[in-house]
Image: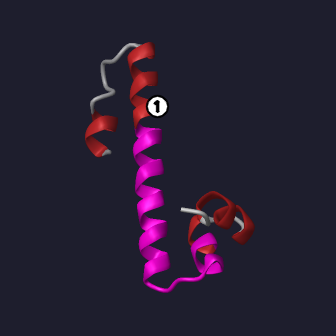
Amino acid sequence: MKTLVGSMDGMGPAEALYAVAELHKEVGRTEAALVRSARRAGLSWEAIALCLGVSKQAVHKKYGKQ
């Protein structure tokens, strides 16, 4: 992620937006993997939600059926 953000220097606006879109995808994949890992480790939906700064319902809706 640092590499992607660092590579944005000197980019035009369109290129920078493509880079941001890739960064969003990477963050989403990383978050999903960490939520799965947290659940396997026994963390509750409430604990995961607290870490992510969202409601328990929001995190369960997003990741509960994976």
Residue 50, image x, y percentages: 63, 74
- In the displayed structure, 2 sits above or below 63; it is above
In magenta segment, residue 46: yes
Q: Is residue 56 left or right of residue 29?
A: right
Secondary structure, magenta segment, majority class:
helix
The N terminus sits in image quarter: top left
- Between 29 and 15, the residue placed more toward the observer is 29
Residue 20, image x, y percentages: 44, 32
Residue 35, image x, y percentages: 49, 67
Corner quadrant of residue 16? top left
Residue at image x 62%, y 76%?
45
In magenta segment, residue 54: no
Which range of residues does the magenta coloring cover? 23-49
Say what secondary structure mark 1 lies in. Answer: helix
Residue at image x 43%, y 84%?
41
- Between 7 and 63, the residue placed more toward the observer is 63
Q: Is residue 66 left or right of residue 46?
A: left
Corner quadrant of residue 54? bottom right
Residue 27, image x, y percentages: 44, 49
Corner quadrant of residue 15? top left
**The residue positioned farthest toward the front in the image shown:** 65
Label 1 sits on residue? 21
Q: Residues within 10 Å of mark 1 (few under 14, many from 20)?
A: few
Type of the residue with mark 1: Ala
Residue at image x 27%, y 30%?
7
- In the displayed structure, 47 sits above or below 17; it is below
